[in-house]
Amino acid sequence: MIAVNNNFPLRDHGVSNALSLDELPRHRWYFIKEGFSPKLVEQAIETDGVCQDQLLLDPFSGSGTVALTGVKEGLKAHAFEVNPFLRFLSATKLQQARPDAFQAAARCLLTRLERPVKSPLEGFSTFTEGNRWNRWLFPTSVLQSFEAGMQALASVDQVHRDLLKLALIGAAMDCCNATRDGKCLRYPKGWIGNQATASDFRERFEARAEIIAEDLIIAPLNSQHASVLEGDARQLVMAPSQHKFRLCVTSPPYLNSFDYSDVYRPELFLGGFVGSNQSLMDVRLRTIRSHVQASWQQPKKNKFGTLYQGCISEIVESVDLLWDKRIPMMIQAYFEDMETILQGLRARADNDASVWLVVSTSAYAGIEVPVDLIIAEIGQRNGWFLREVGVLRYMRSSSQHVKHVVDVEKKSVPLRESVVIFDAAARR
């Protein structure tokens, strides 16, 4: 029987969330709430004795914390990311430029923002005023100034282009009428009377460019051995590779019905990473099957160990209490995808490799899905040696997942974030 380690040294040290990233050089260029602390990566490198120039892998790059931390520690870093905006963000954080030359390019671009250009997003969906939902993400003047900057990037030196593009996207989101709240964008009370102006957008761009310039000085990088590939992690980890990793630190999407392609929809369209709702759906269909907001391919496997079988049977029996009848299929598909990931990682692992996998448990119909322990079982069935399942913190269950549950005790199922640590060889 697999047990969790409630006395894990990193428990309640804030390593599984991104609360401090908005203050750290390079990390602060664009805040992603779902990221985790570089302290977790640093601890994994130190604990497992990973040496300089050895390979660090992250199949779910997200905001790029693993690759960025690895490069700072002198490691080679390879990462995969299916969301094209997040891949861009991860890769851009690794870039280096001469600070004075970058500042000159930013000043030049700032003058171009004063000459607005019609945006292709005007009149599209909820991006500007005048739609049938009677709410809009951006004032038209902000989008037009943003578009002026995007068009001006074509004449910018390549070494500065992505850095300035990130500052433009960040400034636009600073001026967005909606704010991120959990799994969606919400419009705060009184937002119509508090919309940003083109002048506000220019000020935010200037401020963000100054932060980037400052970090280029205080946190220089040599990222020649770093790469962030865009694509489906399930396919990329299974592709043959001559590069064996020494350490993998990663955090796949949680089994919590969170659609990252939806919550970062504004950035995907702003940056031209997608150009239509169909291309957005194409991104969504390449992600891990951790939510029900897409017509997924049906899973084929259903043997993931005794813990999985126990909880999925109970959830199926309580299907009338679920907020979506497709949840049992989603759970099955999620673990099928995670088995694919673990199989691919095993083939890419060096002889003394280890994997630190950060996940969260879930609860549906008031029934716990012990994701960490199920993944531990899956890993052991696919050639990995389980070192431990360390608890990082405990959390409350989402109200959405238990709103139809009558049993009071089942309405407060405690969830936990854990790190599942595997080794390629048995430890002595």
Image (cartoon, rainbow, N blue to C red):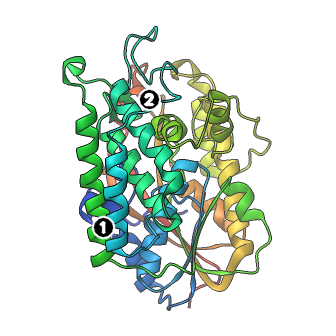
Q: Amino acid at mark 2?
A: His
| Residue with the most extreme top position | 132
Q: Position of residue 345 (x, y in %)?
A: 68, 69
Q: Amino acid at mark 1?
A: Ala
Q: Position of residue 316 (x, y in %)?
A: 62, 29
Mark 1 Cα-neighbour bin, 10 Å: few <14, some 14–19, many ≥20: many
Query: Residue 114 sits in which quadrant?
Result: top left
Q: Which residue is mark 2?
A: 401
Q: Quadrant of the C terminus?
A: bottom right
Q: Position of residue 369 (x, y in %)?
A: 52, 43
Does residue 37 appear anywhere in the picture?
no
Work out how far the residue at label 1 is from the one at label 2, CA to CA, in angstroms. 44 Å
Q: Are marks 1 and 2 in contact (CB under 8 Å)?
A: no
* Residue found 47% across the figure and 48% down from its top: 152
Residues 163 and 297: in front is: 163
Q: Quadrant of the N terminus?
A: bottom right
